[in-house]
Amino acid sequence: MKLPASSWQHRDGLAALMRALGGDAGDTRFVGGCVRDTLLGLPVSDVDLATRLPPDAVIERLKRARIKAVPTGLAHGTVTAVVAGAPVEVTTLRRDVATDGRRATIAYTGDWREDAARRDFTINALSADPATLEVFDYFGGEADLAARRVRFIGDPLTRIAEDHLRILRFFRFHARFGTGAPDAEGLAACVARANDLMALSRERIADELTKLLALPAPAETVALMVEGGVLKPVLPEIVDAAPLARLVRREAAAGVAPDPVRRLAALLPPDPEVAAAVAARLRLSKRAAKRLVSAAVADDDEVAAILAYRIGREEAVDRILLGPRDAATAKALEGWERPRLKLGGGDLIAMGLAAGPEVARTLQLLERSWGEAGFPADAEAQRALARDAVDQALRARQ
Protein backbone atom coordinates (compact mmCIF):
# COMPACT_ATOMS: atom_id res chain seq x y z
CA MET A 1 0.00 0.00 0.00
CA LYS A 2 1.08 3.56 -0.68
CA LEU A 3 0.31 6.63 1.35
CA PRO A 4 -2.19 8.83 -0.50
CA ALA A 5 -0.84 12.18 -1.65
CA SER A 6 -1.78 14.91 0.82
CA SER A 7 -1.12 18.61 1.21
CA TRP A 8 0.85 18.17 4.44
CA GLN A 9 3.54 16.28 2.49
CA HIS A 10 4.32 19.54 0.65
CA ARG A 11 4.63 21.81 3.66
CA ASP A 12 7.28 24.49 3.38
CA GLY A 13 10.66 23.19 4.43
CA LEU A 14 9.65 19.53 4.76
CA ALA A 15 11.43 18.42 1.57
CA ALA A 16 14.65 20.16 2.70
CA LEU A 17 14.35 18.48 6.09
CA MET A 18 13.99 15.08 4.46
CA ARG A 19 17.01 15.67 2.24
CA ALA A 20 19.06 16.64 5.29
CA LEU A 21 18.04 13.46 7.12
CA GLY A 22 18.53 11.03 4.24
CA GLY A 23 14.89 10.43 3.48
CA ASP A 24 15.74 9.52 -0.11
CA ALA A 25 18.23 6.93 1.16
CA GLY A 26 15.77 5.19 3.49
CA ASP A 27 17.27 6.66 6.67
CA THR A 28 14.15 8.58 7.72
CA ARG A 29 10.41 7.92 7.42
CA PHE A 30 7.08 9.50 8.22
CA VAL A 31 5.69 7.69 11.24
CA GLY A 32 2.69 7.42 13.54
CA GLY A 33 -0.28 9.76 13.43
CA CYS A 34 0.45 11.48 10.13
CA VAL A 35 0.50 8.08 8.38
CA ARG A 36 -2.53 6.74 10.25
CA ASP A 37 -4.67 9.84 9.71
CA THR A 38 -3.76 10.16 6.03
CA LEU A 39 -4.83 6.57 5.45
CA LEU A 40 -8.12 7.38 7.18
CA GLY A 41 -8.62 10.54 5.13
CA LEU A 42 -8.38 12.76 8.21
CA PRO A 43 -6.59 16.13 8.41
CA VAL A 44 -3.00 15.98 9.67
CA SER A 45 -1.74 18.56 12.14
CA ASP A 46 1.55 17.16 13.45
CA VAL A 47 4.23 15.47 11.34
CA ASP A 48 6.54 13.05 13.15
CA LEU A 49 9.62 11.38 11.74
CA ALA A 50 11.58 8.28 12.76
CA THR A 51 15.21 7.91 11.72
CA ARG A 52 18.11 5.50 11.86
CA LEU A 53 20.41 8.42 12.61
CA PRO A 54 21.46 8.91 16.25
CA PRO A 55 20.42 12.22 17.85
CA ASP A 56 23.86 13.83 17.61
CA ALA A 57 23.95 13.07 13.88
CA VAL A 58 20.44 14.51 13.47
CA ILE A 59 21.51 17.73 15.17
CA GLU A 60 24.68 17.96 13.08
CA ARG A 61 22.82 17.42 9.80
CA LEU A 62 20.17 19.97 10.69
CA LYS A 63 22.84 22.55 11.51
CA ARG A 64 24.56 21.93 8.17
CA ALA A 65 21.23 22.40 6.40
CA ARG A 66 20.60 25.57 8.43
CA ILE A 67 17.50 24.08 10.00
CA LYS A 68 16.87 24.97 13.62
CA ALA A 69 17.34 21.97 15.95
CA VAL A 70 15.88 21.95 19.47
CA PRO A 71 16.97 19.09 21.80
CA THR A 72 13.51 18.65 23.29
CA GLY A 73 13.80 15.01 24.35
CA LEU A 74 17.35 13.75 24.00
CA ALA A 75 16.81 11.25 26.82
CA HIS A 76 14.24 9.60 24.55
CA GLY A 77 16.12 10.19 21.31
CA THR A 78 13.97 13.10 20.14
CA VAL A 79 15.11 16.27 18.42
CA THR A 80 12.63 18.89 17.23
CA ALA A 81 13.35 20.43 13.85
CA VAL A 82 11.72 23.80 13.21
CA VAL A 83 10.82 24.24 9.55
CA ALA A 84 8.90 27.26 8.30
CA GLY A 85 8.08 28.04 11.92
CA ALA A 86 6.47 24.65 12.56
CA PRO A 87 7.92 21.89 14.78
CA VAL A 88 8.65 18.42 13.41
CA GLU A 89 9.72 15.77 15.95
CA VAL A 90 12.55 13.54 14.78
CA THR A 91 13.08 10.43 16.92
CA THR A 92 15.85 7.88 16.56
CA LEU A 93 14.73 4.26 16.25
CA ARG A 94 14.61 2.71 19.72
CA ARG A 95 14.10 -0.45 21.65
CA ASP A 96 13.17 -0.75 25.32
CA VAL A 97 15.84 -2.02 27.67
CA ALA A 98 13.77 -1.71 30.85
CA THR A 99 10.32 -0.36 31.77
CA ASP A 100 8.49 0.20 35.06
CA GLY A 101 5.05 1.24 33.85
CA ARG A 102 5.85 4.94 33.99
CA ARG A 103 9.06 5.40 32.03
CA ALA A 104 11.39 3.37 29.85
CA THR A 105 15.13 2.98 29.54
CA ILE A 106 15.87 2.84 25.83
CA ALA A 107 18.69 1.90 23.48
CA TYR A 108 19.02 2.96 19.87
CA THR A 109 18.57 0.50 17.04
CA GLY A 110 18.68 0.49 13.27
CA ASP A 111 15.80 -1.97 12.97
CA TRP A 112 12.50 -0.43 11.85
CA ARG A 113 10.45 -3.41 12.99
CA GLU A 114 12.04 -3.38 16.43
CA ASP A 115 11.14 0.29 16.83
CA ALA A 116 7.57 -0.33 15.66
CA ALA A 117 7.22 -3.21 18.13
CA ARG A 118 7.62 -0.88 21.13
CA ARG A 119 4.64 1.27 20.14
CA ASP A 120 1.23 0.78 21.75
CA PHE A 121 -1.30 -0.01 19.00
CA THR A 122 -0.99 -1.48 15.53
CA ILE A 123 -2.55 1.61 13.94
CA ASN A 124 0.18 3.78 15.50
CA ALA A 125 3.06 1.61 14.28
CA LEU A 126 2.74 2.41 10.58
CA SER A 127 5.52 4.25 8.76
CA ALA A 128 5.98 5.53 5.23
CA ASP A 129 8.92 6.16 2.94
CA PRO A 130 8.97 9.88 2.07
CA ALA A 131 10.32 9.27 -1.43
CA THR A 132 8.06 6.45 -2.61
CA LEU A 133 5.21 6.84 -0.06
CA GLU A 134 5.33 3.06 0.47
CA VAL A 135 3.66 2.16 3.78
CA PHE A 136 5.41 -0.28 6.10
CA ASP A 137 3.08 -2.33 8.28
CA TYR A 138 4.67 -4.92 10.58
CA PHE A 139 1.70 -5.79 12.81
CA GLY A 140 -1.52 -5.61 10.79
CA GLY A 141 -2.24 -1.94 11.34
CA GLU A 142 -3.69 -1.43 7.87
CA ALA A 143 -6.29 -4.17 8.44
CA ASP A 144 -7.14 -2.73 11.84
CA LEU A 145 -7.60 0.72 10.32
CA ALA A 146 -9.95 -0.75 7.71
CA ALA A 147 -11.92 -2.50 10.47
CA ARG A 148 -11.77 0.61 12.72
CA ARG A 149 -10.29 -1.58 15.43
CA VAL A 150 -7.83 -0.49 18.13
CA ARG A 151 -5.55 -3.40 18.99
CA PHE A 152 -2.44 -3.64 21.13
CA ILE A 153 0.77 -4.83 19.47
CA GLY A 154 1.46 -8.28 20.85
CA ASP A 155 0.27 -9.19 24.34
CA PRO A 156 -1.89 -6.39 25.83
CA LEU A 157 -0.80 -7.17 29.39
CA THR A 158 2.84 -6.78 28.38
CA ARG A 159 2.13 -3.47 26.66
CA ILE A 160 0.29 -2.19 29.74
CA ALA A 161 3.08 -3.32 32.06
CA GLU A 162 5.49 -1.23 29.99
CA ASP A 163 3.37 1.92 30.29
CA HIS A 164 0.27 2.01 32.47
CA LEU A 165 -1.06 5.07 30.65
CA ARG A 166 -1.85 2.76 27.74
CA ILE A 167 -4.96 1.70 29.65
CA LEU A 168 -6.47 5.15 29.18
CA ARG A 169 -5.02 5.51 25.69
CA PHE A 170 -6.79 2.30 24.64
CA PHE A 171 -10.15 3.82 25.48
CA ARG A 172 -9.32 7.22 23.98
CA PHE A 173 -8.18 5.72 20.69
CA HIS A 174 -11.24 3.46 20.61
CA ALA A 175 -13.50 6.48 21.13
CA ARG A 176 -11.71 8.32 18.33
CA PHE A 177 -11.08 5.59 15.78
CA GLY A 178 -13.00 2.49 16.83
CA THR A 179 -16.33 1.20 15.59
CA GLY A 180 -18.53 -1.22 17.49
CA ALA A 181 -17.29 -3.17 20.47
CA PRO A 182 -13.64 -2.68 21.46
CA ASP A 183 -11.04 -5.39 20.95
CA ALA A 184 -12.00 -8.02 23.54
CA GLU A 185 -8.46 -8.99 24.52
CA GLY A 186 -7.41 -5.39 24.95
CA LEU A 187 -10.51 -4.50 26.95
CA ALA A 188 -10.04 -7.48 29.28
CA ALA A 189 -6.42 -6.51 29.91
CA CYS A 190 -7.33 -2.89 30.71
CA VAL A 191 -10.02 -4.00 33.15
CA ALA A 192 -7.70 -6.51 34.80
CA ARG A 193 -4.89 -3.99 35.25
CA ALA A 194 -6.96 -0.90 36.16
CA ASN A 195 -5.23 -0.62 39.54
CA ASP A 196 -1.99 0.12 37.67
CA LEU A 197 -3.34 3.62 37.02
CA MET A 198 -2.64 4.44 40.66
CA ALA A 199 1.09 4.44 39.90
CA LEU A 200 0.75 7.27 37.37
CA SER A 201 1.00 10.96 38.11
CA ARG A 202 -2.36 12.62 38.34
CA GLU A 203 -1.26 15.15 35.71
CA ARG A 204 -0.82 12.35 33.14
CA ILE A 205 -4.22 10.92 34.05
CA ALA A 206 -5.87 14.34 33.76
CA ASP A 207 -4.23 14.99 30.41
CA GLU A 208 -5.40 11.68 28.94
CA LEU A 209 -8.90 12.00 30.40
CA THR A 210 -9.18 15.54 29.02
CA LYS A 211 -8.26 14.31 25.53
CA LEU A 212 -10.88 11.57 25.77
CA LEU A 213 -13.64 13.88 26.97
CA ALA A 214 -12.83 16.44 24.25
CA LEU A 215 -13.71 13.94 21.51
CA PRO A 216 -17.04 14.37 19.72
CA ALA A 217 -18.78 11.29 21.19
CA PRO A 218 -16.98 9.76 24.19
CA ALA A 219 -20.01 8.70 26.25
CA GLU A 220 -20.26 5.07 25.10
CA THR A 221 -16.57 4.51 25.71
CA VAL A 222 -16.73 6.13 29.16
CA ALA A 223 -19.68 3.86 29.93
CA LEU A 224 -17.45 0.86 29.15
CA MET A 225 -14.81 2.23 31.51
CA VAL A 226 -17.35 2.71 34.29
CA GLU A 227 -18.82 -0.73 33.73
CA GLY A 228 -15.36 -2.32 33.89
CA GLY A 229 -14.30 -0.33 36.95
CA VAL A 230 -11.37 1.16 35.05
CA LEU A 231 -11.69 4.63 36.57
CA LYS A 232 -12.52 3.45 40.08
CA PRO A 233 -8.91 3.31 41.38
CA VAL A 234 -8.26 6.99 40.59
CA LEU A 235 -11.74 8.53 40.23
CA PRO A 236 -14.16 6.51 42.36
CA GLU A 237 -16.64 9.40 42.22
CA ILE A 238 -17.49 8.49 38.61
CA VAL A 239 -20.15 5.79 38.78
CA ASP A 240 -22.51 6.59 35.88
CA ALA A 241 -21.86 7.74 32.31
CA ALA A 242 -25.52 8.53 31.55
CA PRO A 243 -25.22 12.22 32.57
CA LEU A 244 -22.33 12.57 30.14
CA ALA A 245 -24.40 11.10 27.32
CA ARG A 246 -27.18 13.58 28.14
CA LEU A 247 -24.73 16.50 28.12
CA VAL A 248 -23.26 15.45 24.77
CA ARG A 249 -26.76 15.45 23.29
CA ARG A 250 -27.53 18.86 24.77
CA GLU A 251 -24.26 20.37 23.52
CA ALA A 252 -25.12 19.15 20.03
CA ALA A 253 -28.69 20.41 20.24
CA ALA A 254 -27.52 23.84 21.35
CA GLY A 255 -24.67 23.99 18.82
CA VAL A 256 -22.16 24.49 21.63
CA ALA A 257 -18.63 23.11 21.24
CA PRO A 258 -17.65 20.10 23.38
CA ASP A 259 -15.79 21.02 26.53
CA PRO A 260 -13.84 18.48 28.63
CA VAL A 261 -14.18 20.38 31.92
CA ARG A 262 -17.95 20.58 31.52
CA ARG A 263 -18.07 16.91 30.57
CA LEU A 264 -16.00 15.93 33.60
CA ALA A 265 -18.49 17.87 35.74
CA ALA A 266 -21.31 15.81 34.22
CA LEU A 267 -19.61 12.63 35.43
CA LEU A 268 -19.28 13.85 39.02
CA PRO A 269 -21.94 14.12 41.73
CA PRO A 270 -23.48 17.64 41.90
CA ASP A 271 -21.49 18.51 45.00
CA PRO A 272 -19.03 21.46 45.03
CA GLU A 273 -16.88 19.82 47.71
CA VAL A 274 -16.51 16.66 45.61
CA ALA A 275 -15.70 18.77 42.55
CA ALA A 276 -13.04 20.69 44.47
CA ALA A 277 -11.49 17.45 45.74
CA VAL A 278 -11.34 15.98 42.23
CA ALA A 279 -9.85 19.17 40.80
CA ALA A 280 -7.14 19.12 43.46
CA ARG A 281 -6.44 15.42 42.94
CA LEU A 282 -6.06 15.87 39.19
CA ARG A 283 -4.07 19.07 39.72
CA LEU A 284 -6.29 21.00 37.35
CA SER A 285 -5.50 24.63 36.61
CA LYS A 286 -7.10 27.26 38.84
CA ARG A 287 -9.41 28.22 35.99
CA ALA A 288 -10.52 24.64 35.32
CA ALA A 289 -10.99 23.98 39.04
CA LYS A 290 -13.15 27.09 39.41
CA ARG A 291 -15.37 25.97 36.54
CA LEU A 292 -15.65 22.41 37.85
CA VAL A 293 -16.78 23.64 41.28
CA SER A 294 -19.20 26.17 39.78
CA ALA A 295 -20.73 23.49 37.54
CA ALA A 296 -21.58 21.43 40.62
CA VAL A 297 -24.02 24.13 41.80
CA ALA A 298 -27.60 23.58 40.63
CA ASP A 299 -28.94 25.93 37.95
CA ASP A 300 -31.73 28.06 39.43
CA ASP A 301 -33.21 29.16 36.08
CA GLU A 302 -31.86 32.70 36.47
CA VAL A 303 -31.96 34.82 33.30
CA ALA A 304 -29.01 33.58 31.25
CA ALA A 305 -27.36 36.96 30.79
CA ILE A 306 -27.74 37.81 34.49
CA LEU A 307 -26.27 34.43 35.43
CA ALA A 308 -23.35 35.04 33.06
CA TYR A 309 -22.79 38.50 34.56
CA ARG A 310 -22.79 37.08 38.07
CA ILE A 311 -20.63 33.95 37.63
CA GLY A 312 -19.00 34.25 34.18
CA ARG A 313 -20.03 33.25 30.66
CA GLU A 314 -18.40 29.80 30.57
CA GLU A 315 -19.69 28.95 34.02
CA ALA A 316 -23.20 30.01 32.98
CA VAL A 317 -23.08 27.84 29.85
CA ASP A 318 -21.93 24.91 32.00
CA ARG A 319 -24.80 25.25 34.46
CA ILE A 320 -27.41 25.69 31.73
CA LEU A 321 -26.30 22.61 29.77
CA LEU A 322 -25.95 20.51 32.91
CA GLY A 323 -29.30 21.67 34.26
CA PRO A 324 -32.95 21.23 33.25
CA ARG A 325 -33.63 24.33 31.17
CA ASP A 326 -33.75 24.55 27.36
CA ALA A 327 -30.25 23.88 26.02
CA ALA A 328 -30.71 26.56 23.35
CA THR A 329 -30.42 29.15 26.12
CA ALA A 330 -26.69 28.39 26.26
CA LYS A 331 -26.24 29.23 22.58
CA ALA A 332 -27.59 32.72 23.24
CA LEU A 333 -24.49 33.42 25.35
CA GLU A 334 -22.11 32.75 22.46
CA GLY A 335 -19.93 35.82 22.00
CA TRP A 336 -21.45 37.44 25.10
CA GLU A 337 -19.19 40.01 26.75
CA ARG A 338 -19.61 41.21 30.28
CA PRO A 339 -21.26 44.66 30.28
CA ARG A 340 -19.85 47.47 32.41
CA LEU A 341 -21.81 49.26 35.09
CA LYS A 342 -20.55 52.84 35.14
CA LEU A 343 -21.62 53.50 38.73
CA GLY A 344 -20.00 52.35 41.95
CA GLY A 345 -20.35 52.56 45.70
CA GLY A 346 -19.24 56.20 45.76
CA ASP A 347 -22.10 57.19 43.49
CA LEU A 348 -24.60 55.47 45.79
CA ILE A 349 -23.17 57.29 48.82
CA ALA A 350 -23.52 60.58 46.92
CA MET A 351 -27.19 59.71 46.43
CA GLY A 352 -27.75 59.46 50.18
CA LEU A 353 -26.52 56.07 51.43
CA ALA A 354 -24.18 55.82 54.40
CA ALA A 355 -20.88 54.06 53.87
CA GLY A 356 -20.97 50.46 55.02
CA PRO A 357 -22.72 47.15 54.30
CA GLU A 358 -25.82 48.97 53.01
CA VAL A 359 -23.82 50.16 50.00
CA ALA A 360 -22.77 46.66 49.01
CA ARG A 361 -26.34 45.35 49.37
CA THR A 362 -27.75 48.18 47.31
CA LEU A 363 -25.09 47.73 44.63
CA GLN A 364 -26.13 44.09 44.32
CA LEU A 365 -29.77 45.18 44.01
CA LEU A 366 -28.77 47.71 41.36
CA GLU A 367 -26.86 45.11 39.34
CA ARG A 368 -29.87 42.79 39.40
CA SER A 369 -32.33 45.46 38.30
CA TRP A 370 -29.84 46.60 35.64
CA GLY A 371 -29.65 43.03 34.35
CA GLU A 372 -33.42 42.63 34.36
CA ALA A 373 -33.59 45.80 32.27
CA GLY A 374 -31.25 44.25 29.72
CA PHE A 375 -27.99 45.86 30.93
CA PRO A 376 -28.56 49.27 29.31
CA ALA A 377 -25.24 51.00 28.54
CA ASP A 378 -26.69 54.52 28.67
CA ALA A 379 -25.34 56.40 31.70
CA GLU A 380 -28.64 58.15 32.41
CA ALA A 381 -30.54 54.85 32.34
CA GLN A 382 -28.05 53.37 34.78
CA ARG A 383 -28.32 56.43 37.04
CA ALA A 384 -32.12 56.15 37.09
CA LEU A 385 -31.87 52.52 38.14
CA ALA A 386 -29.37 53.49 40.82
CA ARG A 387 -31.70 56.21 42.12
CA ASP A 388 -34.53 53.64 42.42
CA ALA A 389 -32.23 51.22 44.26
CA VAL A 390 -31.11 53.92 46.70
CA ASP A 391 -34.67 55.05 47.31
CA GLN A 392 -35.66 51.45 48.05
CA ALA A 393 -32.78 51.12 50.51
CA LEU A 394 -33.67 54.36 52.25
CA ARG A 395 -37.31 53.31 52.58
CA ALA A 396 -36.20 50.01 54.08
CA ARG A 397 -34.47 51.94 56.90
CA GLN A 398 -37.72 53.44 58.08
Image: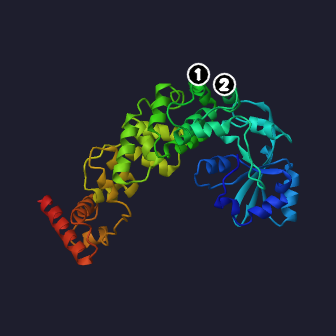
Which three-letter amino acid code belongs to the residue tagged 1?
Ala
Residue 378 horizontal side relative to residue 148, left or right: left
Pinpoint residue 201: horizontal percent, then vertical percent.
Answer: 62, 37
288 or 174, which is in the foreground? 174
Residue 11 horizontal side relative to residue 326, left or right: right
**Residue at horizontal 28%, vertical 73%?**
377
**Residue at horizontal 48%, vertical 49%?**
288
97 or 121, which is in the foreground? 121
Rounded to the nearest angstrom, the CA distance separating label 1 from label 2 is 9 Å
> In the rendered image, which quarter contains the C terminus?
bottom left
Q: On residue 157, which mark appears?
A: 2
How does the figure colour the protein chain or chains?
Answer: rainbow
Name which quarter of the figure residue 124 lies in: top right
Pinpoint residue 326: horizontal percent, then vertical percent.
Answer: 27, 49
87 or 220, which is in the foreground? 220
68 or 206, which is in the foreground? 68
Q: On residue 192, which mark appears?
A: 1
- Number of residues whose C-alpha sits closer than 10 Å to that of mark 2, classed few (under 14), some (14–19) or many (20 or more): some
Mark 1 or 2 closer to N-term?
2
**Residue at horizontal 46%, vertical 26%?**
227
- Number of residues whose C-alpha sits closer than 10 Å to that of mark 1, classed few (under 14), some (14–19) or many (20 or more): some
Q: On residue 224, which mark appears?
A: none
**Residue at horizontal 64%, vertical 37%?**
143
Residue at disc 2, secondary structure: helix
Residue 205 appearing in the image? no
Which three-letter amino acid code belongs to the residue tagged 2?
Leu
Tag 1–tag 2 contact (CB < 8 Å)? yes
Residue 354 appearing in the image? yes
Name which quarter of the figure residue 272 lies in: top left
Pinpoint residue 127: horizontal percent, then vertical percent.
Answer: 73, 46
